[in-house]
Image: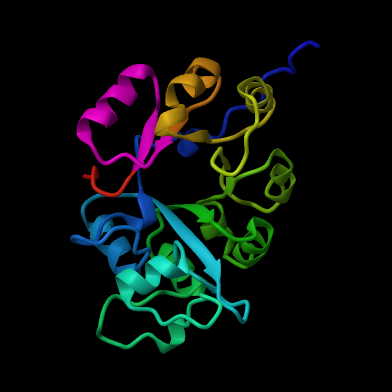
Amino acid sequence: GRLPAPAPAPRAWDAAPARIAHGGGALGALRTTNTVEALERNYGRGVRWFEVDFLPDSRGAWWVVHDWAQASAVLGVPLDSDGRGLPGEQRSGSAPSVPRLEQVLDWFGRHPDARLVTDTKGDNGLLLRQLRAASPGVRARIHPQLYRLEELGWVTSDGFGAPIFTTYRSAYPWWVLRRFVQRTPLLAVTVSRAEADEACAALCGHIPVLAHTVNDPADAAGLARAGLTGIYTDDLLP
């Protein structure tokens, strides 16, 4: 059938960035810590776009963490018998602490030019419900990542910034995603490095395409030459 008419573009100040700090950006030799210390360090370097990961603990409280096994290995967070984190029992002073969701929202509230791109290995609907509690000014600077097409309805009327569709939790054909982005005011589509060539052939020219996670300058330059708009990175930051 006939393709739908193009959707209105996101607001100009929502233009997709060339660099997004993955997991808050590197903190010295540590990557994907998602800590306030990482946000502060990289904000001080000039970073303004941050991808941050969220997960609940066994009691349903939401924390800023990529996954509990990684938080245990890198930050020394104790785990329960089911492998869920016990961040409240993290030994103080041993490493940067895992922040609560509310602490990171507070940090973004105090840095009004910083943007938050969400990620979760958990239930995205539950995460978005938590993020709706952010103040309107912060919520407008939260760009939710969506993993299924039907998730768009979860963010269209809640005052969030333009969402990003990311492909790592689905397997839609590229033609389906092309039709979707032509009628949806997304900020960008995010793909893996392995998908970048196919994704750009299908989508570049219709929507900004971003790749994750890129830490090699030659890889970043090649992706830019191929037509991608930007990357998620731990290290290639200002």
x, y (%) of residue 108? 43, 62
Side of 77 where 234 appears, left or right: left
* Vertical arrangement, residue 113 with respect to residue 172, above or below: below
User: Considering only vertical position in the picture, is 41 above or below 183?
Assistant: below
Residue span colored magenta: 211-232
Q: Percent from the top left, x then y, of residue 25?
A: 30, 54
Name the residue furthest front.
Answer: 81
**Residue 65 coordinates in the image, percent (x, y):** 44, 66
Q: Nearer the viewer, residue 134 or 93?
A: 93
Q: Nearer the viewer, residue 140 or 176?
A: 176
Say which quarter of the image contains residue 233. Answer: top left
Residue at left offset 33%, top offset 25%: 223
Decide if residue 187 is on the left or right side of residue 77.
right
Quarter occupied by the C terminus: top left
Q: Position of residue 87 (x, y in %)?
A: 44, 81
Q: Is residue 19 left or right of residue 192?
A: left
